[in-house]
Amino acid sequence: MHVIHLDHATINTADVSSSVSFYRYYLGLKPGWRPPVDVGGAWLYPEGGSYPILHLIAHSEHVSKSGMFDHIAFRAKDLRAYLAKLKAIGDSYKASPVPGTNLIQVHHRDPNEVLVEVNFADESLDEAERSTT
């Protein structure tokens, strides 16, 4: 037995609808089939994906600063389009190259204060677009 890749991440949220909207807007994840369970939430799928990569679990009270969960990371394409989405909404972010790699990382927070990291390979970052935090 060996691990192949990350299956999914789970985020606690006091507002499922806002979280679904956030991940749909920025990452194109869409809600899909979810088994009947006792707690509310949503499973989010990537475009064309047959399995959910992000689970949202409804909580009646806000989980401050995302509890013990540090961040969730995604690999994506089209850095310029992603930065344009952030700017269109006015969300603050930090974008920077990862030393010794071909990656640009963009960090910002979701409605639950979870740190979202999005990695872009082989794309360039203009100095003026490094940060709005």
Image (tube, helix red, strand yellow):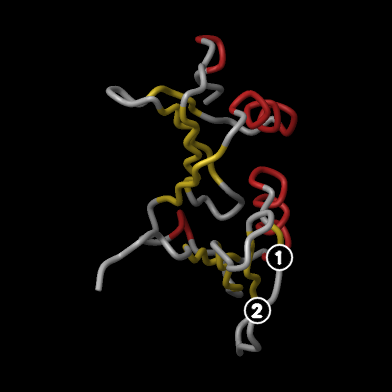
x, y percent for residue 19: 65, 57
x, y percent for residue 100: 27, 23
Label annotation for residue 104: none
x, y percent for residue 49: 63, 61
Q: Which amino acid does label 2 sit on?
A: Arg
Extreme-front residue of the structure: 1
Against 11, residue 98 (above or below) is above
Against 12, residue 94 (above or below) is above
Give the residue displayed 74% in from the left and 29% down from the top: 88
Give the residue displayed 51% in from the left and 63% down from the top: 11
- Quarter of the image for the N terminus: give it: bottom left
Extreme-left residue of the structure: 1
Label annotation for residue 34: 2
Under tag 2, what secondary structure? loop
Q: With 96 as the anchor, is 58 left or right in this view?
A: right
Give the residue displayed 56% in from the left and 22% down from the top: 132
Q: What residue type is labelled 1?
A: Pro
Residue 25: image quadrant is top right
Against 92, residue 73 (above or below) is below
x, y percent for residue 107: 48, 36
Q: With 33 as the anchor, is 79 left or right in this view?
A: left
Measured Cα–Cα span from mark 2 to mark 1? 9 Å
Residue marked by disc 1: 31
Under tag 1, what secondary structure? strand
Give the residue displayed 47% in from the left and 36% down from the top: 119
Label 1 neighbourhood size at 10 Å, few (<14), some (14-19), many (20+)? many
User: Mark 2–mark 1 contact, CB under 8 Å?
Assistant: yes
